[in-house]
Amino acid sequence: MFLQRRNRITRRSAAIRSLVAETVLTPNDFILPIFIDEGENIKYEIPSMPGYFRYSLDNTVKEVKELWKMGIKSVLLFVKCDDKVKDNTGKESWNKNGLMQRSISAIKDAVPEMVVMTDVALDPYSEYGHDGIVDIASGYILNDETVDALTLMSLSHAEAGADFIAPSDMMDGRIGAFRKALEENNFSNVGIMSYSAKYASCFYGPFRDALDSAPGFGDKKTYQMNYANRIEAINETLQDVEQGADIVMVKPAMAYLDIIREVKNAVTIPVSAYHVSGEYAMIKAAAKMGWLDEDKLILESLTSIKRAGADLIATYFAKDAVKLLG
C-alpha cells in the first residue's frame, strides 16, 4: 500500500516526539501557592490535599529557599487568619504587621529574586467567609465598599515588597482602582495578576479547608462567574486589561480549558490558569486507589493547561512537576 503521508513517522521514538512537541513544560511555567499560618515550626498537612501543607512563617522561608534551588521562581501567598481578628470590614488585611505583610517581607529578605504574588480578597479576614463586605440586612456583598478595602490591602502588600498583587475577589472595577492607587503611591513597578475569569466552582472545597475560609452563609454566585458562561469571561478579561491588569487568570483550569483558549485568543498580555485544589485532590485520590498513574497524570494535566493557552500555571503540583521534568 502506497501512502503519500505517514503521520506516524514523527511519533516513532521518544527523541523524535520531543523534537516536534508543540507544547513543552518547564519550571518557568509554574507558580506555587503557599498557605501560611501564625506560630512557629508548623507544618500541617491539609486533610483534603494529601501531601500539601500549611506552614508557619519560619518554615515558609525554608520552603521558599528550597523552591528557588529547584528552579521555581514564583510563589502565590495565602494566609490563615485567626478568628479573633476577623470582622466584616477586613481591616486586618491591611495591617502593616499582619501575617501576609510579614510573610512578604521575610520571603523577599530571604530570596530577593523570588517573584512574590499575593492573594487580594477579604474571605480570610471576614467573619462571614465572603470575599467582600457583607450588607447585614440583605446578605448582599457590597461592591464599592469592598473595592475600597481591597485597595488598602493592595497598597499594604506593595509596601511590604510584593511583586504582583493577585485580586481573586471578582468585584467590579477593582483593577482600575488598584492601578490608580499603585501609581499614585509610587508603586508603579508592582504588577497586577487579575483573576479575571474566576468561576463559582465546587472545585475550591479543599482550599477552603486549608484556610478555614468557607462562606458562613449562602454561596459566592453573586460575584464569581456562572460556569455556564463563556462570552462573559471574555468581557470580564478585556475590561481588566483595559483597567491595567498585567496578567489575567482563568480559574479553575482543567474544567475550563476552552475558556483559557478563548482568553488567550482575545488578549495580548500573559494568561495564567489556576490548577485548583479540587483538581489536585481528585488526582491524588485516584492515584491512591491505584486507578491512575499520578506522575503521568500530573504532566498530562499540566501540559493540557499550557496547550490550551496558559503562559503561567498556578499549581499545587509545581514541585512534583519540576522533579518529573528532571
Image: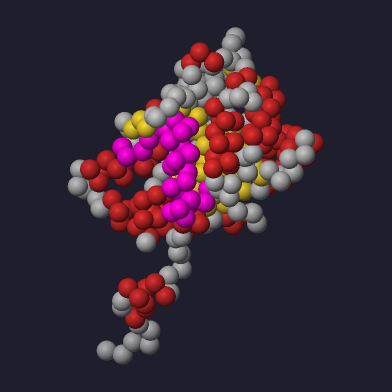
Count of marks, rendered view: 0
Determine the residue located farthest toward the top in the rendered image: 137
**Any magenta on residue 131?**
no
Tell me residue 258's x, y (percent): 49, 51
Side (left or right) of 325 relative to 171: left
Identify whether 216 is placed above or below 50. Answer: above
Any part of residue 210 in sight = no
Q: Nearer the viewer, residue 224 or 69?
A: 69
Quarter of the image where one finds residue 284:
top left
Tell me residue 236's x, y (percent): 63, 41
Determine the residue located farthest toward the right in the rendered image: 184
Side (left or right) of 129 relative to 242: left
Residue beneath the point at 66% across and 48% down: 246
- Please give the range of residues in magenta: 50-74
**Any magenta on residue 69?**
yes
Tell me residue 325's x, y (percent): 38, 60
The quadrant of the picture occupied by the C terminus is: bottom left
Residue beneath the point at 46% across and 64% down: 23
Quarter of the image where one finds residue 122:
top right
Quarter of the image where one finds residue 208:
top left
Side (left or right) of 286 relative to 131: left
Identify whether 12 is placed above or below 27. Answer: below
Residue beneath the point at 51% across and 13% down: 84
Any part of residue 127 in sight = yes
Q: Nearer the viewer, residue 235 or 308?
A: 308
Determine the residue located farthest toward the bottom in the rendered image: 2
Q: Nearer the viewer, residue 220 or 66?
A: 66
- Identify the coloring: secondary structure
Residue beneath the point at 55% across and 36% down: 106
The quadrant of the picture occupied by the N terminus is: bottom left
Tell me residue 175's x, y (percent): 68, 38
